[in-house]
Amino acid sequence: MAQRAWDDTFITVLRKHLKLLPAGEPLAPDASLVELGLDSLEMVGLLIDLESVYEVSFPDSEMNFETFASAERLWAVLTRLRATS
């Protein structure tokens, strides 16, 4: 399992959209977000929340299930967007 690299705000926002992740259970960086309850509707909500909290805009090219595959992948994209905004 990869080491956690994200901040507490990220995990708080993300957990709101993972209905199948029990409260208090750690989120493995490489765990499938889809298997934890992230469907297309939740993905839109998560996207809106992340854009608002981190003051970034996800380009159309990043709005796909690959970007939202795991916490570590999503954090990597978010980190890149924050660095370029």
Image (cartoon, grey):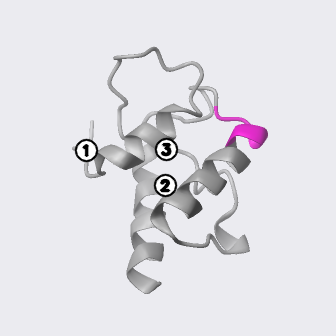
User: Which element type, helix, strand or loop, lies under badge 3?
Assistant: loop
Q: What number is the disc on residue 74?
A: 2
SS class of the residue under badge 2? Answer: helix
The amino acid beneath tag 3 is Ser
Labels 2 & 3 near each other (Cβ < 8 A): yes
Q: Is residue 66 above or below residue 8?
A: below
42 left or right, relative to 16: right
Query: Main SS of the magenta segment?
Result: helix
Q: Quadrant of residue 24?
A: top left
**Relative to the observer, which residue lies in front, 18 or 36?**
18
**What residue is drawn where x is 39% and y is 68%?**
79
Residue 39 inside the magenta-drawn segment: yes
Mark 3 surroundings: few (<14), some (14-19) or many (≥20) residues within 10 A: many
> Mark 1 is on which residue type?
Arg
Report which residue position mark 1 lands on: 4
Relative to 59, is 25 above or below?
above
Q: Work out which residue is located at the far right of the displayed protein and give it.
A: 41
Q: Which residues are magenta?
A: 38-42
- The answer to the question of whether label 3 and label 1 lie on touching residues, with beta carbons closer than 8 A, is no
Numbered badge on residue 70: 3
Position of residue 37 measured from the top left corner of the image (x, y, whole percent) = 63, 27
Q: Horizontal placement of 55 versus 82: left or right?
A: right
Whole-Å distance between the Cαs marked 2 and 3? 6 Å
